[in-house]
Amino acid sequence: MYAQMVKSEAADDSAEAKAFQARIDAGEKIEPKDWMPAGYRKTLIRQMGQHAHSEIVGQLPEGNWITRAPTLERKAILLAKVQDEAGHGLYLYCAAETLGVSRDELTEMLLDGRMKYSSIFNYPTLTWADMGAVGWLVDGAAIMNQVPLQRTSFGPYSRAMIRICKEESFHQRQGYDIMMKMAAGTEAQKKMAQDALNRLWFPSLMMFGPSDKDSVHSTQSMAWKIKMNTNDELRQKFVDQTVPQAEYLGLTVPDKDLKWNDEKGGYDFTEPDWDEFFDVLKGNGPCNTERLAARNKAWDDGKWVRDGLLAHAEKRSIRKVAAQ
Ligand code: FAQ
């Protein structure tokens, strides 16, 4: 169904497409039953699917620390955060389903490599300070990207983003709270916090996608208001917001060329290593194999539940027909 539905990506200059663009330009929301160009549907399924998968795979690096949280309170908070991420994945799968793709199809595309999830989740979480850095930096980057998406043109996506952003703000604060404790702790704790920042800084900058000159989808996605900003615009905003937060913690951003630029009203900073980024996308990051193996296992382990539910639904529908 998915392959059939999205086979045409060609630019559409029909009267319908022009009327559609006029609706977008006027700031109207597009709803699932409205006419939309095949490319708009395809781009949304790709972006929302990738976003949903990121939330689901994104549970793994933090789930890894639930049993090792230092206090009962920290454990409860982390558990709630990871559960929120599962919830975000589910809202986003539901929103994507309104475009005519099923959650099973999306999952199969993740598992066989046709769909991606965020590069950041292919990096390991080695110490408790990484839980602070993930909340602070990864959720911080996610919020920077997702707040503008609350105004995205597709109604179900935009509404899902409103709720998700509220929860992400709590996630970011809990991460920063862990960093404040660690940075104000013993020398060893402060060192651990600095080490987490050192390892996660550049992977967090990569979350915004390749630099604008290499972004394949930005121009069309921005014309359709599927994306509201370019990758570089959001990356710059993230750096400008995060550097003072690092300073407040007494930590050093691992970029010797980081410098305030009065003229542009923002920081000059070193770009991430884009070769590393594209290599991670190809499956060669430190944890790609482990992450996909975990998702495949969950899918295989859940087969008996899916089979049971389908058999039950079938039996009920046979009974209903027989009773008519
Ligand atoms: N990772 O043409 P562009 C979260 C791919 S949520 C992997 O610029 P686009 C919450 C891109 O797909 C994090 N792939 O692409 C949380 C394309 O390849 P394709 C997820 C990436 O779509 C926190 C190619 O590169 N958030 O973290 C990445 O216009 C803590 C060319 O790039 C979202 O998904 C990447 N970082 O812009 C959970 C937000 N960047 O598909 C747990 C919505 C690019 O043609 C714990 N998504 N690619 O094969 C977006 O805003 C956009 O999709 C971008 C990429 C900005 C990510």
Image (cartoon, rainbow, N blue to C red):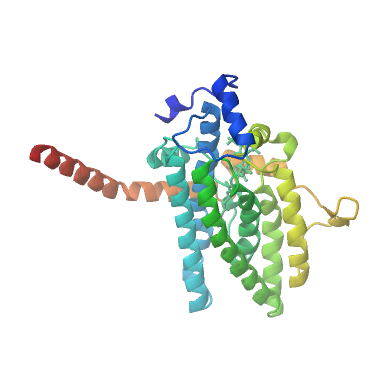
Dividing the image into four equal quarters, which quarter contains ligand 1? top right
Q: Residue at x 37, y 47 (%)?
A: 299
From the image, which quarter does the C terminus lie in? top left
Above or below — where is 177 with respect to 1? below
User: Residue lying furthest left in this view?
Assistant: 323
Does residue 64 appear in the picture of this structure? Answer: no
User: Residue lying furthest right in this view?
Assistant: 263
- In the image, taking residue 194 as reference, residue 286 lies left or right, namely left
Q: Total label count? A: 0
Q: Residue at x 67, y 47 (%)?
A: 208
Q: Which of 305 and 158 is in front in this view?
A: 158
Q: Which of 308 and 91 is in front in this view?
A: 91
Does residue 193 appear in the picture of this structure? Answer: yes
| Residue 302 pos. (x, y %) | 32, 50
| Residue 40 pos. (x, y %) | 55, 31
| Residue 310 pos. (x, y %) | 24, 43
Above or below — where is 143 with respect to 310? below
- In the image, taking residue 67 as reference, residue 229 lies left or right, namely right
Q: Residue at x 51, y 71 (%)?
A: 77
| Residue 286 pos. (x, y %) | 59, 50
From the image, which quarter does the N terminus lie in? top left
- In the image, taking residue 8 as reference, residue 144 lies left or right, namely right
User: Residue lying furthest bottom in this view?
Assistant: 186
Q: Nearer the viewer, residue 321 or 50?
A: 321
Quarter residue 101 falls in: top left
User: Residue lying furthest top in this view?
Assistant: 14
Q: Which residue is drawn at 51% across and 66% down?
A: 65
